[in-house]
Image (cartoon, rainbow, N blue to C red):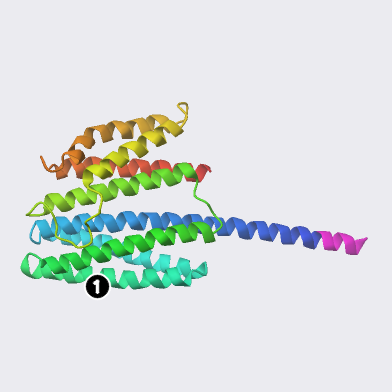
Amino acid sequence: MMMRVFKQSIFWIAVSCAALHASWAHAEAKLDLRTLHQLQLDLLEVASQFHRYQGSEGNKKYYLSISSKLDGVKKALTDTVNALENYGLTNEAQTLKTHSQEYLKNLNTALASIKNGGFAAFSVIDAYLNAHDAILSALSDAYLAINSAGGYSVPPRVAELRGLTLLMQRMYTKYIEVSSSQFGYTPRSGQENAETIDDLAARFTRNLEELKNAIPVNSPYAPRINDVQTTWLFLEKSFVNYNEKSVPYLITKFGNQIIEELSAIAEEMESEA
């Protein structure tokens, strides 16, 4: 009898330990994915500050802004590489590590060129922007890999919200790139089939409307999404008609407001899931 009770106790202890381990693993994956998502936003923000720095012919305030943001970016890149290795995703970890080194090298070269001469050669800018695109692609792959290997699935509404924040940040960064360029564009290779700003704006409108329709009208998030949509309707024409009148101040102020609010809603929703 005593032996049976002992074995049952061991069994339930093992079950409890397994449940605790699974819970811990899910929490780790959730945190890793949240860090990875924010990293993508931060890299795009660095790009927008870079375009301002280049467009202003080396205004020191943009350099300081980039340097400040890069401290967090470097740490997040290292943390993400380590996370990938912990999940056994060695190929993804090595790919991200390689792209991180290439990205930082080309960014530093471009920043030094602007700091020393007020501008960087088109080939230097092109190298940095291509490295920027490559690391974003690697991070997108890493996000999907951790989402699968970590045993944690991001809730659908949270995934949609994160997608909207990335889309807004990407669109906002592209707008700053165009408005900061002396020639109305930044020469870069491999962009022949890239989406234009008005293409991105149309996609943002569709995706935001789909999200709004998916959230019950009695949800506490419904009025907040409505407020985001109201702000977006104010900005939309500026994105669609980006070649007619440049308003980077409005894009910066209200674009960031939209990103911050959507990010806050996503974090709250994920905490409740």
Q: Position of residue 251 (x, y in %)?
A: 20, 43
User: Which residues lie in the magenta part?
Assistant: 1-8
Crowding at mark 1 (Cα within 10 Å: few <14, some 14-19, many 20+) = some
Q: Residue at x 60, y 55 (%)?
A: 23
Q: Residue at x 27, y 55 (%)?
A: 44
Q: Residue at x 20, y 70 (%)?
A: 108
Magenta stretch: helix, strand or loop mostly: helix
Looking at the image, can residue 90 be seen?
Answer: yes
Q: Quadrant of the N terminus?
A: bottom right
Which residue is the site of mark 1? 105
Looking at the image, can residue 111 be seen?
Answer: no
Q: What secondary structure is marked by label 1?
A: helix
Q: Position of residue 264 (x, y in %)?
A: 39, 43
Q: Amino acid at mark 1?
A: Lys
- Residue placed most toward the observer, 149 or 10: 149
Q: Position of residue 138 (x, y in %)?
A: 37, 63
Question: Across the whole image, how many numbered discs are drawn on residues?
Answer: 1
Q: Is residue 165 above or below residue 76?
A: above
- Residue placed most toward the observer, 47 or 6: 47
Residue 246, quarter of picture: top left
Q: Is residue 187 above or below residue 173?
A: below
Q: Position of residue 159 (x, y in %)?
A: 44, 47
User: Quick check: 3 left or right of 71?
Assistant: right
Q: Is residue 7 magenta?
A: yes
User: Quick check: 232 left or right of 77?
Assistant: left
